[in-house]
Each structure stands twice: as C-alpha cells, then as structure tokens.
Amino acid sequence: MNLASENTALVLKPSGLPVRQFIECTRCLDASRDETSATEWAESHLRKRPGHDTFRTVLMASWRLKPRGEPLALKPAD
C-alpha cells in the first residue's frame, strides 16, 4: 500500500503501527514467546535461571522505508 506520493511527506504515527508486546528478562534478554501470563513466564524463567529476577514489558513496532527516490511505502520489517 503506497501511503505517500513522491511529493508528499510521509507522516508516521506510533498509534498506526502494528505492535508486538512481550515480557523480557533484563539480565539475559530471554523473552516470552507465547501468550503465557507474565507472572507464569517470569516464575518459570527464574526456576530455570536463579538470579534472573528482574523483568520488563516490551512494546515494539518495526517498519521499513524505501530509500529516497523510490515511492514511499510502509512495509512490515522482516
């Protein structure tokens, strides 16, 4: 889907981007891969890796823009 012509500025708003949300261990960056509850995943991770007891929620949106000179199109990142 072409979102802008060559003469139009592309305005990218965070609220319009597809997002992925997950839980991540701050010590080793291992992350939840499914819809397990945050507490269940963190407790399981802590049992496997004692001392890994600090976690964070990550909300990530990735996108790619074509180089200048080509028509701009918003595409999901690989």
Image: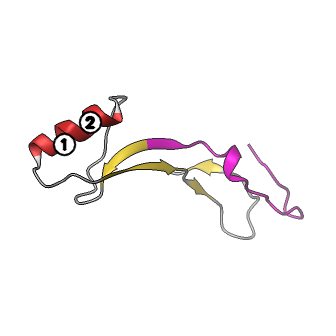
The residue identified by callout 1 is 45
On the image, the x and y values in percent for residue 75 come to: 62, 49
Q: Looking at the image, how many numbered discs can be counted on the residues?
A: 2
Q: Taking 72 as reference, is 24 left or right?
A: left
Decide: is 54 above or below 46.
below
Q: Where residue 27 appears, x then y in whole percent? A: 23, 60
Question: In which image quadrant can residue 37 be found?
Answer: top left
Q: Quadrant of residue 35?
A: top left
Label 2 to label 1, Cα distance in Å?
A: 6 Å
Residue type of the residue flagged with mark 2: Trp
Magenta span: helix, strand or loop, mainly? loop
Q: In the figure, residue 72 lies in which quadrant? A: bottom right
Q: Which residues are magenta?
A: 1-21
In-front residue for pair 33/53? 53
- Assign a secondary structure to mark 1: helix
Q: Is residue 30 above or below residue 69?
A: above
